[in-house]
């Protein structure tokens, strides 16, 4: 993992924040797609963008970095 500035969370779009919140709840990409009423490929694209913004390459790193940047459930605190 590349070192990141922990003080400034990466900017995520509203859709990326929704997808990340559902990933942190342990939901699969297919379930997320159904819940958000979007295509599973779109969910996968959002996840890839989130991973790029967090500079991670695995699901474990994704969860760790998301929790470091946003805290548990804190993903909604950064709505802008």
Image (cartoon, rainbow, N blue to C red):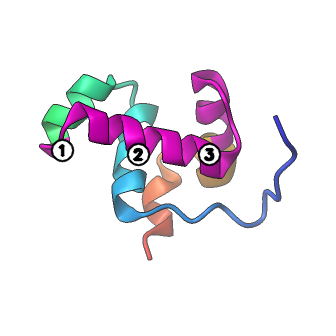
Q: Name the front one of labels 1 and 2.
A: 2
Residue 72 appears in the rendering: no
Crowding at mark 1 (Cα within 10 Å: few <14, some 14-19, many 20+): some
Residue 49 appears in the rendering: yes
Q: Can you identify the residue that label 1 sits on?
A: 36
The C terminus sits in image quarter: bottom left
User: Residue drawn at (57%, 24%), measured in percent from left and top?
Assistant: 59
Q: Can you identify the residue that label 3 sits on?
A: 52
Q: Name the front one of labels 3 and 1.
A: 3
- The residue closer to the viewer here, 34 or 67, is 34
User: Residue drawn at (45%, 39%), measured in percent from left and top?
Assistant: 47
Q: Which mark is residue 14?
A: none
Q: Can you identify the residue that label 2 sits on?
A: 46
Crowding at mark 3 (Cα within 10 Å: few <14, some 14-19, many 20+): few
Residue 54 lies within the magenta run: yes
Magenta-colored span: 36-65
Crowding at mark 2 (Cα within 10 Å: few <14, some 14-19, many 20+): many
Q: In this picture, is 10 found above or below 35? A: below
Task: Give the image quarter of residue 29.
Answer: top left
Position of 21 with respect to 9 (left or right) is: left
């Amino acid at each position: 993992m590349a070192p990141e500035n922990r003080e400034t969370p990466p900017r995520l779009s509203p859709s990326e924040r929704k997808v990340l919140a559902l990933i942190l709840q342990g939901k699969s990409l297919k379930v997320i797609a159904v819940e958000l009423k979007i295509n599973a490929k779109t969910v996968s694209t959002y996840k890839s963008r989130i991973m790029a913004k967090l500079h991670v390459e695995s699901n474990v790193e994704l969860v760790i970095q998301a929790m470091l940047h946003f805290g548990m459930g804190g993903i909604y605190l950064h709505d802008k």
